[in-house]
Image (spheres, helix red, strand yellow):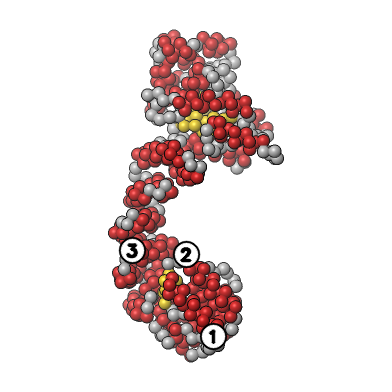
């Protein structure tokens, strides 16, 4: 059931899938929907019998039949016509031990695998082999020689778990020279009751299985699912893909694909899964073995998809989780070259470079990112923080000014750069010069807002009022930024603050949540002007807490961009002024 659904999911995704019925004692795949009406008279038993008769490896194409699940092709290598008495005679005439020891049976199976790889000049993406698990010669072929991976499906009972222990151990010990790597094991508890586990019975059995079979978590867990179509042996996931059982089969399929690192989707799934596996192993102090397995997968994926940007980005994320900054930089370089998530990859590489003190690379990446026509605030803001951290004050402002000249028409990045220039009134004057020189203020709200802030910072209050709009327009708007800045500019122009506008600011503040320290500071000033001291003090505390995650913030007390120490000093000065008996008079007014 699980094998057929896995095959159907893979076939639906365009994969060439061969299903092999190697459960020779009790074959049954031919009773499933896609194969039920097909000629399955010749199969594995006949293939081996012909070899024993002729001493020559038969052509497997004569035994493979093609069917369809809906419109998707799927291929089938049956066990043989097991309903005929001759099948039983042929099967029992095969001495598997003699085949291997005296008749080069190992080479026969290797040739069979090679024929699968060359089938129809295309081979198969996946060969799914159904085999019973047990102490049989055929079981050994199917669990140790044939596969790259084994899905161990079991009903979680003590009998089943204990019986699997030696079989799993033998698979793990298999190291034949022909094998490139160890067989990968996926454990899947199946037919699990979906009922209340009040006494912890199921939980205990699953924990016992993990301990005895040596795995951290199952590839999937398949619950018992009562449905009549299961009795008809139909491919369940095709008609019920959104059902719980359908989703469980998809989870199992994804885990199987993650082991096939030649499959691009499998490699991507592995990269999504590996960081969490690594983290869990680290927490359980099972670090060494897991790291070795991950390193092996990283090597294979890198070799198979050396110029794939998306995969390189996934490798970089894994390297980041493993704190391998040099590897992260290398993989991000591939992603950038291939144009995959270029901006995000660039900012990640800049951060990784700073951790290795590669300041030249970090600065180059940060500058190129901010200069990009596709730059957004999500990347430009942290890029500016990187530049700030690795350059002097003078160099930082020079770089920001240069970037602002290039990006003033790219709102909101241009507006952010202009705001970051306003660390002094001289910087605000530079903002005015840049903005007036380009005359592009109508192109973006943030550039326009930065221009207004610079006008207020340089005490050009009348022009600021003109830029914001008429008082009636502002009062009727829902823009809390426009209302506050208009109130401040009017205060500077007339020497008096309009408390109606201040009340409007606080009213608008109730319509959405603000976490920005500048917003909380503005609300504190409004409450202070209205005489609401306790509310003002609470907003000042919120502003101070909010600043912990910021590199800098605009301060309405001085109308300049401020870093932590200066912003904190502004908040303290505001608190003292609000607590006093005098009239509030922010420094930006003079």
Q: Residue at x 54, y 19 (%)?
A: 135
Q: Secondary structure at mark 3?
A: helix
Which residue is at the front of the view, 125 or 121?
A: 125
| CA–CA distance in space, label 2 to label 1 | 30 Å
Which residue is at the front of the view, 114 or 271?
A: 271
The reply to whether callout 3 and callout 1 are in contact (CB within 8 Å) is no
Residue 527 visible in the shown view: yes
Which residue is at the front of the view, 293 or 284?
A: 284
The reply to whether callout 2 and callout 1 are in contact (CB within 8 Å) is no
The image shows residue 277, relative to residue 482, as above or below, that is above
Comparing labels 3 and 1, the label whose residue is closer to the camera:
1
Q: Mark 3 vs mark 1: which is more N-terminal?
A: 3
| Residue 470 - label | none
Which residue is at the front of the view, 84 or 582?
A: 582
Q: Secondary structure at mark 1?
A: loop
Residue 291 found in image quarter: top left
Q: Residue at x 44, y 32 (%)?
A: 125
| CA–CA distance in space, label 3 to label 2 | 19 Å
Residue at mark 1: 580
Residue at mark 2: 549
Residue 370 visible in the shown view: no
Where is residue 255 shown, x and y percent of the image? 50, 37
Residue at mark 3: 390
Say which quadrant the N terminus sits in. top right
Q: Mark 3 vs mark 2: which is more N-terminal?
A: 3
Q: Is 362 on the left or on the right of 491, as rendered?
A: left
Q: Residue at x 42, y 67 (%)?
A: 551
């Amino acid at each position: 059931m699980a094998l057929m659904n896995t095959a159907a999911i893979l076939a639906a995704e365009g994969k060439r899938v061969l299903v092999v019925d190697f459960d020779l004692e009790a074959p049954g795949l031919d009773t499933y929907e896609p194969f039920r009406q097909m000629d399955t008279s010749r199969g594995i038993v006949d293939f081996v019998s012909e070899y024993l008769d002729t001493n020559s490896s038969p052509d497997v194409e004569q035994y493979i039949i093609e069917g369809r699940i809906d419109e998707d092709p799927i291929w089938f290598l049956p066990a043989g016509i097991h309903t005929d008495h001759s099948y039983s005679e042929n099967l029992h005439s095969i001495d598997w031990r003699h085949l291997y020891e005296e008749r080069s049976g190992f080479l026969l199976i290797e040739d069979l695998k090679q024929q699968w790889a060359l089938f129809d000049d295309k081979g198969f993406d996946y060969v799914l082999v159904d085999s019973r698990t047990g102490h049989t010669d055929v079981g050994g072929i199917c669990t140790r020689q044939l596969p790259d991976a084994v899905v161990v499906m079991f009903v979680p009972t003590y009998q089943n778990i204990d019986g699997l222990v030696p079989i799993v151990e033998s698979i793990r010990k298999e190291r034949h020279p022909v094998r490139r790597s160890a067989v990968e094991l996926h454990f899947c508890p199946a037919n699990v009751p979906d009922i209340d586990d009040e006494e912890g019975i199921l939980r205990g059995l699953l924990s016992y299985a993990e301990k005895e079979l040596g795995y951290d978590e199952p590839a999937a867990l398949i619950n018992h699912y009562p449905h009549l179509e299961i009795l008809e042996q139909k491919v369940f996931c095709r008609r019920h893909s959104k059902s719980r059982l359908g989703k469980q089969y998809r989870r199992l399929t994804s885990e199987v694909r993650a082991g096939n690192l030649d499959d691009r989707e499998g490699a991507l799934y592995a990269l999504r899964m590996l960081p969490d596996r690594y983290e869990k192993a680290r927490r359980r102090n099972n670090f060494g073995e897991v790291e070795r397995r991950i390193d092996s997968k990283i090597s294979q994926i890198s070799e198979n998809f050396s110029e794939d940007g998306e995969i390189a980005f996934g490798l970089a994320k894994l390297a980041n989780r493993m704190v391998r900054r040099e590897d992260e930089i290398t993989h991000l370089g591939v992603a950038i070259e291939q144009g995959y998530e270029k901006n995000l990859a660039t900012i990640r590489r800049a951060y990784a470079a700073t951790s290795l003190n590669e300041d030249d690379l970090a600065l180059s990446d940060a500058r190129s990112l901010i200069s990009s026509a596709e730059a957004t605030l999500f990347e430009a803001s942290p890029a500016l923080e990187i530049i700030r951290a690795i350059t002097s004050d003078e160099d930082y402002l020079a770089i920001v000014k240069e970037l602002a000249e290039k990006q003033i028409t790219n709102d909101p990045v241009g507006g952010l750069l202009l705001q970051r220039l306003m660390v002094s009134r001289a910087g605000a004057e530079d903002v005015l010069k840049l903005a007036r020189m380009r005359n592009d203020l109508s192109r973006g709200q943030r550039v326009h807002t930065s221009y207004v802030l610079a006008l207020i910072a340089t005490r050009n209050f009348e022009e600021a009022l003109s830029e914001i709009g008429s008082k009636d327009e502002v009062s009727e708007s829902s823009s809390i930024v426009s209302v506050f800045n208009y109130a401040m500019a009017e205060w500077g122009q007339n020497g008096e603050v309009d408390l109606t506008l201040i009340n409007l600011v606080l009213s608008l503040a109730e319509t959405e949540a603000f976490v920005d320290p500048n917003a909380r500071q503005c609300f504190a000033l409004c409450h202070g002007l209205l005489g609401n001291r306790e509310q003002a003090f609470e907003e000042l505390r919120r502003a101070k807490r909010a600043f912990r995650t910021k590199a800098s913030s605009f301060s309405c007390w001085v109308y300049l961009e401020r870093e932590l120490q200066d912003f904190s000093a502004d908040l303290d000065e505001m608190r003292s002024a609000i607590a006093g008996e005098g009239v509030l008079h922010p420094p930006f007014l003079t």
